[in-house]
Amino acid sequence: MRSASAPIAAALVLVLLAGCDTTQQQSARAKLTATRLLAGRDPLLVRTPDPAIRVGRVEIVRHGAAAAVIVELRNTSVAPLTDLPISVGLAPDRRHRRYLNRRGGLGYFENHVAAVPAGGSTTWVFTTHRLTRASGRPFAVVGAPARPPISSAAGTLPDIVATATSPAGPRVGVRLRNAAGVPQYGMQVYALARRGSRYVAAGRVTVAHLGSHAGARVKVRLIGSTRGAAVTVLAQPTIFD
């Protein structure tokens, strides 16, 4: 059985070595990172939706056993919402549902939405490479944040700028710029390809660390067909103060 201490210790070191923030800030970020690492090990099933979150379009794109589920979300409240649990899957009929991100051992942000701005919207992506059978309508259920909250209440979200640097293809280059004074850990970057009104490809990547007022370049591998598609990219902050 693999020990939980190694990845947690690595995360703590990574956070505590970050810049010249106060000891209190470093400690809070280390605790948040460790809490998320542990939470990602447990199964998660969301049945009760958060009334503050409206789920818009939910689509799935596939390539062989690989699949990406794209979920459009809108926050109707007057405050940013963070660390939102989310369940996605396929519903072959009204009585049955097959959940795709229910099992334990997934990354924390494979069953949580990092952040949705106040009165704003975002798009979240789940990817899997083990969907051998797929039928039914894709669905998503977004729950309320944990009580007590895992992360601190965010008055505003850090400004992370993501720009596509390559055309549509199997891999999309993304340039990132952290315009805020808050370093990011485990930051989520999504790439989406649309042809007309339909999503035809999507992908995600986790950025282990992006320092405050710093930049980085990453590549996102897309699942689906990108021929003739327009690509958009976005980054969701995961550390808020």
Image (cartoon, rainbow, N blue to C red):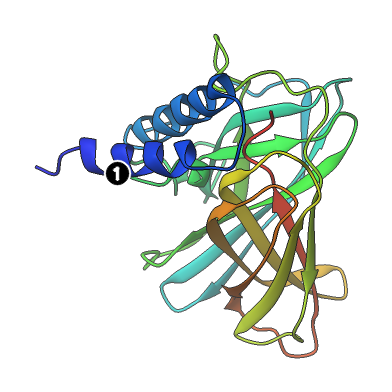
Image location of residue 164, percent across then percent down? 77, 74
Q: Is residue 27 visible?
A: yes
Q: Report whether 226 appears left or right of 231.
A: left
Note whether 233 is above or below 235 in the view shown: below
* Residue at x 14% of width, y 44% of height: 2
Q: Secondary structure at mark 1?
A: helix
Determine the image quadrant of residue 196.
Answer: bottom right
* Residue at x 63% of width, y 38% of height: 114
29, 44: nearer the viewer: 29
Callout 1 crowding tier (Cα within 10 Å): few <14, some 14–19, many ≥20: few
Q: Report whether 130 appears left or right of 190.
A: left
126, 19: nearer the viewer: 19
- Residue lying at the far front of the rendered structure: 20
Image location of residue 189, percent across then percent down? 64, 58
Image location of residue 109, percent across then percent down? 52, 44
Q: Is residue 104 visible?
A: no
Determine the image quadrant of residue 203.
Answer: bottom right
Quadrant housing the N terminus: top left
Quadrant housing the C terminus: top right
Three-letter code for the amino acid on which mark 1 is drawn: Pro
Image location of residue 37, percent across then percent down? 38, 36
* Residue at x 80% of width, y 69% of height: 163
227, 183: nearer the viewer: 183
* Pointer 1 residue: 7
